[in-house]
Image: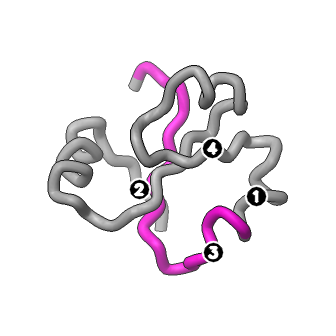
Amino acid sequence: MAKTISRNELSEKIARGDSFRLVETLPATAFQHAHLPGAINMPPDQVQQLAATLLPEKQADIIVYCASPT
């Protein structure tokens, strides 16, 4: 089930060393310019091609982010 977490909640998960996959959904050029440490890139137009390879664990805690002011 998908839910939204805040930047502070993400920061806390990182600080605690929680186990999760961090996925940035911006174009590859934006990802190459800057991204959060440990993030993998999965541009929206490539999700079907990349998801099974990059996120093979179906029960994994996955956090997805993009460029948004919120």
Q: Which residue is mark 4?
A: 41
Q: Earlier in the sequence, mark 2 or mark 4?
A: 2
Q: Residues within 10 Å of mark 3 (few under 14, many from 20)?
A: few
Label 4: few (<14), some (14–19) or many (≥20) C-alpha neighbours in 10 Å: many
Do residues under tags 1 and 4 come within 8 Å of each other at their CB atoms?
Answer: no
Amino acid residing under circle 3: Pro
Nearest to N terminus: mark 3 or mark 4: 4
- Circle 3/circle 1 CB separation < 8 Å: no
Distance from the alpha carbon under mark 1 to that under mark 4: 9 Å
Which residue is disc 1 drawn over? 50
Give amino acid for label 1: Leu
Look at the picture and state if 30 lies above or below 7. above
Residue 40: image location, x then y, percent: 56, 48
Residue to which mark 3 is pinned: 56
Residue occupying the point 46% across, 59% down: 21
Q: Which mark is residue 32?
A: none
At a point 49% along the width and 46% down the height, the residue shown is 39
Amino acid type for the residue under numbered disc 2: Lys
Horizontally, residue 50 falls left or right of residue 56, namely right
Residue ID at (62%, 40%): 25
**Sequence-first disc among 2 and 1:** 2
User: What range of the chain is rendered magenta?
Assistant: 53-69
Q: CA distance from mark 3 to mark 2?
A: 20 Å
In this image, 52 relative to 64: left or right? Answer: right
Mark 2 — residue? 3
Residue shown at the point (80%, 48%) measured from the top left: 46
